[in-house]
Each structure stands twice: as structure tokens, then as C-alpha cells.
Image: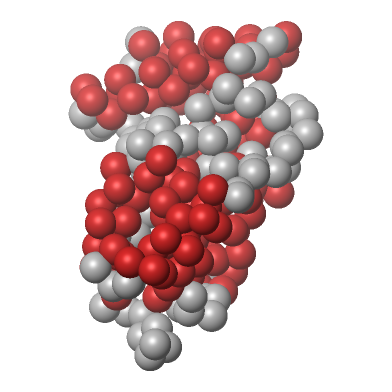
Amino acid sequence: MATAAGRAATVLAMAFCLAFSSGCAQRHLESASQSLEKEDYESAVTSLELGAQKGDRRCAYLLGAMLISGESIDADLAEGERWIREAAEAELPIAQAYLGILYANGEGVEKDLTTAAEWYRRAAEYGNSLGQTAFGVATFHGMGVPADPMEGYSWTKLAADQGYPRAIANLSEMSNELTKKEREQAEKRAARFHPKENEGSDPDFPGNREYRPFTNVRGLAPSFRGAAKHSVPPPQR
């Protein structure tokens, strides 16, 4: 059974979704939201499934996140991963970042840091702060991609500028590993960044840019120190 906070997070997610939905998709999201308020989780899942089956990537993402987290329903990693992947392949940035985390943790899929980094990158290029934070750590430490501390700092700076707490903490740790000149150069890289356009996307849909915990998601963006224990040391400068 989910905690009250967990239920509130999910209901809040639905409220955000409803604000930027229309037509058939809105009806499915509204139905899911009403079911969650009544703690009727089976009906909520059914509504999200209907929306996902009709191609709504937001429904697919929310459904996958619920199935993976096991929030008030039986966890199903394989099915959750399938829906997250569908949303990610439909270019929903938050789903791309989440799929990367699944690969990094080996949840529902075989652990693959290279594939994880690729999904992080795709989300990061759209401006998603969870993707930028995770890709920043991966790039800084050389986890699935060649180590490039300055590039990793740049991506982390972008997420920190959006106010994502994990990125802010990571940036502080990374700062201690770079010289002042390197930090300045990395910040110039970040200043030149422009997010990719996401055709057909709702630009204000939470998660397209900044990360917000729609559901009680496990395994969020890696911390700098935690990742350092499992990384390839950056090249000597």
C-alpha cells in the first residue's frame, strides 16, 4: 500500500497531465485521477492502459512508472519497462531519462551503462533536468561514455540552473574536481546549449524539461559520490 505522500504525488501528477491534455487522452487521464483519489488503483491502471494503447505517451509513462515502483499495485518490472520504453521511443524526455535509469540499475532489463548513457543523452538534449543530471554524472566519470569531466560539469550545470536538487549537489562536488579555468570553460559550454525541439510535445507537460516525481519512482539520478565508486577515473590533467 502506498503512503499518503505517494498517493498525493501520483494525484498531483495526474492534475498536471490534465492541465495540458485534450480529447480522448484527457478523458483517460481524468478517469485515472478520479480513481486514484478513491484509492481504486486497478481502475486507474485500466484507464492509463486505455490511454497508452491509443498512443498517448504520457499515459504510457505514468503507467510504466506505477508498475515499476509498485505503488499501490503489484510491481511488474517487465511490463513497466515496456511502457516506459514505448513512451521513450515516442520522444517523451522524462521517459527517456527513466529508461536510462532502468538500464543503469539493471531493473527490468540487463544492466548496460552504454545504453543508459544514450537514453540520458537523448533526454538531456531536450532539456530534461533528470536526463541532464544523469548524463552529467555518466560523462564526468566515464560510465558508458568516454570520461570528460568538463562536459559532465556542463550538463550538470544546466540541470542545476533549472533548480533540480540532485544536480545542485552534484555540481558542488564536481567543482572540487576541476580548476577554476576548467569550470569557466564548462560554464561557457552550458551557456551555448539550446534544447532540441520536440515535435508534438506539450512543452509545459511536467518532465519535458524539469524533473518532477510523478510517482514513487525508485533509483533517481545518480549522486556524484555514489557514481564515483563504480566509475573509470577521469584522465590525468
Q: Residue at x 42, y 60 (%)?
A: 184
Viewer-proximal residue, 65 or 119?
119
The image position of residue 193, as x and y in percent, is: 60, 49
Residue 207, placed above or below residue 128: above
Viewer-proximal residue, 21 or 141?
141
Q: Is residue 180 left or right of residue 201?
A: left
Residue 69 visible in the displayed image: no
- Residue at the farthest bottom position: 236
What colour scheme governs how the chains and residues are painted in the rendered image of this protein? secondary structure
Residue 111, placed above or below residue 12: below
- Residue at the farthest right position: 199
Viewer-proximal residue, 203 or 27?
203
Q: Residue at x 25, y 52 (%)?
A: 169
Q: Residue at x 25, y 32 (%)?
A: 1
Q: Residue at x 39, y 18 (%)?
A: 12
Residue 119, placed above or below residue 142: above
The image position of residue 202, as x and y in percent, is: 66, 24
The image position of residue 94, as x and y in percent, is: 54, 41
The image position of residue 11, as x and y in percent, is: 39, 18
Residue 3, placed above or below residue 154: above
Q: Is residue 206 left or right of residue 133?
A: right
Residue 83 occupies which quadrant of the picture? top right
Residue 117 visible in the displayed image: yes
Viewer-proximal residue, 96 or 122?
122
Quarter of the rendering occupied by the C terminus: bottom left
